[in-house]
Image: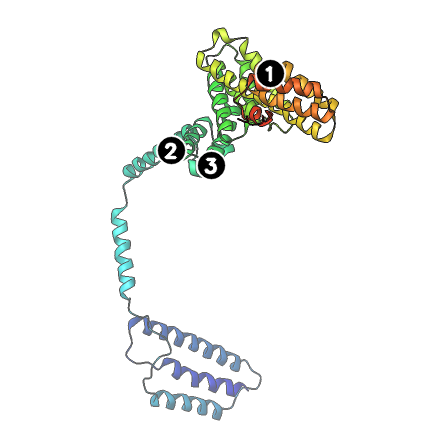
Amino acid sequence: MKRSLFLSLFLILPSMAKTEQTSEPQKTMVNQEVDIAKGEILQASDSLASDTNPPSDDDYDTASDIAQDDMEDRQPVKTLVFAPAPPSDYVKQQQLLSQQFRRDLPTKDEAKKRYKERRARASHKKWLEARRGPRKENLTISQMNFHQLLQRKNELLLEGDYETSLKYLEKMFRLTEHADQLVYIMLEWAELLMKTGQYAKAEKLFDEFIKLYPGNEYAEQAFVKAIECSWMQTARHDRDQTKTESTLKLIEQFETRNAVYAQESIERAQNVKEMCQQKLADSNLYVAYHYIGRGVYRSAHKRLDTARNEDLVKRPNIEPRLLQLEIELAQAEQNTNIEAQKLSELVEKFPEHEIALALKPKTAPETT
C-alpha cells in the first residue's frame, strides 16, 4: 500500500507541472502547486523511512526510474487554471466613471457649505409645512385647518357643489373661535341649507341666529328667511295645517318689530302671511265640504262658522264658495228658509260670479 502511494505521488506531479507558455500569474500558481506536491512527497518519504518494514532497494530503484522516465518524456500541455478574461467595455467605462467621481469629490470646505445649504432648505420646508399644513390633496376634512376649509369651500361653491360645501361649513363652524366669523358662517350655512331644500334645518339655524344676535344687522334678513323656510314646510290645504299656524305665529313676532325693519322685508313677510291665511281658509272649506258629503252636519256647521267668522275677514275672496257650501248644507238638512236666504244673498252680492249663475233659478221666457 505504501509503495502504491509513493508511485501515485510521482505520477501526479508531472501532470500538475505541465504547462504551455503562460503568463506570469499562471507560472506562479503552477510553482505553488509543485511546491505543495513536493511537500507531500517528502512527508510520504519520511513516513516510509520510519516504517519497520521499509521497501527493498529494488523498489526504490523502480520508483525512481519511473519518475525519471516520466519527467523526460513529458510534453507541455494546457493548464487547468483559467486565465482571467480581458476587461470588457462596460468594466472600462465603470473604471472611467470611478476616476471621474474621484476627481469631482468636493473639498472639505465645499462639503461643509453644501451640508449647511441642505440643512437650511430642510428647515425652510418644515417651516412652510407648519404654516401652510400638509398638501391639500392629501388631506381629509378632519385634517384641514380653518383656512384650508375656507379655501376649499369657496372652490366648491364656484363649482355649484352646495351639498359638499355644507360639510366644510359645518367643520368651520366647529373650528372657529372668533365671533365675527361665527356670524357669517351661520348665515351662509343656513342659506345653503335653504338652497338645497333642507328647510327644517335652515329654519332652526336662522332661529338660533336671531336669538344669539338679535341686534345684528343681518338679524332682519335671517328673520324673513326663517319665515319663508317655515312656509315651505307647510302641507297642502287638504292636510294638517299645524305648520301653517306656527308660521303665522312667527309672522306675528316679526310684526312686533316692523318699525325697525325695511319695507322690503315687511312686504315679503306679508306675502307669506296672506298665503298662510288663504291656505287655512281653503282647508276649512275643504273639510266642511267632506263633512256635508258624509252627513256629518254638526261638524260641517262648525267649519263653516269658523270660515265665516275668522277666515272671511282676512280673505274675502272665499265668500262665494262659503255661500255655496251653506246652500248645500241647507239643502242636505232640508232647511228651505236658510237655503232661500243664502241663495238670494249670493245672487245679490255676486251676480256675475259663475257660482251665482249656476245656482240662479231659471225664469220662463216671456210670451207675446
Q: Which mark is residue 187?
A: none
Residue 118 is left or right of residue 294, and the answer is: left
Q: Which mark is residue 139?
A: 3
Q: Is residue 264 visible?
A: yes
- Residue 230: % across, % down: 56, 23
Question: In the rendered image, which residue does mark 2 sit on?
Answer: 125
Q: Nearer the viewer, residue 115 or 145?
A: 145
| Callout in the foreground (1, 2) | 1
Question: In the rendered image, which residue does mark 1 sit on?
Answer: 312
Mark 1 or 2, nearer chain start = 2
- Residue 245: % across, % down: 62, 19
Image point (45%, 92%), residue name:
62
Look at label 3 and name its amino acid: Leu
Image point (69%, 18%), residue name:
338
Look at label 1 and name its amino acid: Leu
Contact flag, marks 3 and 1 (Cβ < 8 Å): no
Q: Is residue 249 visible?
A: no
Look at label 2 and name its amino acid: Lys
Q: CA distance from mark 2 to mark 3?
A: 18 Å
Q: Quadrant of residue 283?
A: top right
Q: Nearer the viewer, residue 90 or 273?
A: 273
Is residue 157 shown above or below 319?
below
Is residue 188 shown above or below 41?
above
Residue 81 is left or right of residue 275, and the answer is: left
Secondary structure type for disc 2: helix
Is residue 336 shown above or below 17?
above
